[in-house]
């Protein structure tokens, strides 16, 4: 049986009417940047749990999660009601392989996310280990509306810290937005728009790519990368691309 750990919300930030971050205090065992845990609430006599990625570096004094209220969802709308002082449950064990130690050796690291899928990448970047290892870091965030381009201050801090070693490219599909590409990530990859804009070509010999979020983005981006000679990375069959789907394409 899971020994749930009680946490307390110590703050929240609303980015849009459905996108929000929760800051949580909880005495959790050690976890790695890029991992996720399960958050749970007791609803209608049942402890209902779902996976959520840590946004923070593990060295942070609190845990932070970036969530979207899924319309008709069972847990996320209830998590969206939480305010400072409320309690919730956290699973004792973190999981996930989007961690520095699992990423194969390479020169450049591309972090491609949609929506809340940027969470584990912010955790990895804030932790600093990938930044020490890779000579270039490219963070790409695809969203529908500009308000969903979360954590601009943190991203600006990375840019100050790492200068030209770090690039950030937002993509916004439903409205014009300054500096954002008006297309989805797979299209920007397939048409070469991202590479042209950033002045970098994608080369399996040196680039490593992490994909996180919408399963269609993950599948379509992987398909394009495969045409460029990239392969999915597995412990037993090393490749260059790692991924995490936030929901299943069949049910989403
Ligand atoms: C490894 C992992 C990490 C995750 N990390 C995060 C995170 O950091 N932040 C976050 O908000 N969510 C994250 N999720 C998704 C989260 O676990 C829940 O699936 C989500 O909050 C919906 O739960 P629900 O109970 O409200 O909806 P449910 O009642 O479980 O499901 C409603 C439907 O919505 C679909 N769905 C789930 N998520 C989304 C979405 N984002 N957009 C559209 N449809 C969706 C489900 O497939 C299902 O068909 C993660 C999922 C996984 C597998």
Image: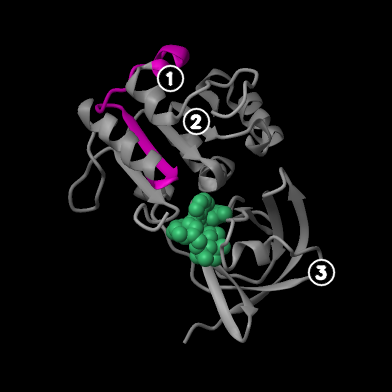
Residue 223 percent coordinates (x, y): 26, 35
Residue 206 is a magenta residue: yes
Q: Is residue 25 above or below residue 119?
A: below
Q: Earlier in the sequence, mark 1 or mark 3?
A: 3
Numbered disc 1: secondary structure: helix
For residue 2, above or below residue 114: below
Residue at 77% over, 71% down: 86
CB within 8 Å, label 3 to label 2? no
Kindly report the distance in space between the C-alpha atoms of the residues bearing marks 1 and 3.
43 Å
State the SS at label 3. Answer: loop
- Pointer 1 with pointer 2, Cβ within 8 A: yes
Which residues make up the magenta segment? 193-215
Name the side, left or right, on which 240 lies relative to 83.
Answer: left
- The span from disc 3 to disc 2 (Cα, nearest Å) is 34 Å
Mark 2 surroundings within 10 Å by alpha-carbon count, few (fewer than 14), some (14 through 19), many (20 or more):
many
Q: Which residue is mark 1?
A: 194
Q: Position of residue 44 (x, y in %)?
A: 63, 83
Q: Residue at x 51, y 43 (%)?
A: 121
Inspect this view and state whether residue 30 appears: no
Q: Quadrant of residue 61?
A: bottom right
Q: Is residue 72 left or right of residue 1?
A: right
Residue 19 seen: yes
Residue 172 is situated, as x and y percent measured from the top left of the image, at: 56, 28
Q: Quadrant of residue 72?
A: bottom right
Q: Is mark 2 within 8 Å of ligand 1?
A: no
Q: Which residue is mark 2?
A: 140
**SS for callout 2:** strand
The circle drawn on residue 85 is 3
């Amino acid at each position: 049986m899971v020994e749930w750990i009680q946490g307390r919300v110590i703050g929240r930030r609303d980015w849009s009417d459905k996108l929000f971050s929760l800051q949580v205090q909880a005495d959790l065992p050690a976890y790695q940047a890029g991992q996720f845990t399960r958050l749970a609430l007791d609803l209608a006599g049942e402890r209902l749990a779902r996976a959520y990625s840590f946004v923070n570096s593990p060295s942070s004094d609190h845990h932070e999660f970036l969530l979207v209220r899924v319309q008709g969802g069972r847990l996320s709308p209830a998590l969206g009601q939480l305010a400072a002082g409320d309690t919730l449950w956290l699973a004792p064990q973190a999981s996930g392989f989007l961690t520095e130690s699992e990423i194969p050796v390479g020169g450049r690291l591309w972090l491609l996310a949609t929506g809340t899928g940027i969470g584990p990448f912010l955790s990895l970047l804030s932790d600093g280990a990938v930044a020490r290892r890779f000579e270039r870091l490219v963070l790409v965030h695809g969203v529908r509306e500009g308000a969903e381009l979360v954590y601009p201050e943190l991203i600006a801090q990375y840019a100050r810290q790492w200068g030209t070693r770090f690039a950030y490219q937002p993509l916004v599909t439903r409205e014009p937005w300054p500096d954002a590409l008006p297309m989805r990530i797979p299209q920007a990859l397939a048409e070469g728009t991202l590479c042209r804009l950033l002045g970098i070509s994608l080369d399996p010999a040196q680039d490593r790519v992490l994909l996180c979020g919408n399963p269609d983005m993950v599948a379509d981006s992987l398909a394009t990368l495969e045409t460029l000679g990239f392969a999915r990375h597995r412990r037993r069959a090393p490749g260059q691309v790692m991924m995490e789907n936030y929901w299943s394409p069949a049910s989403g």
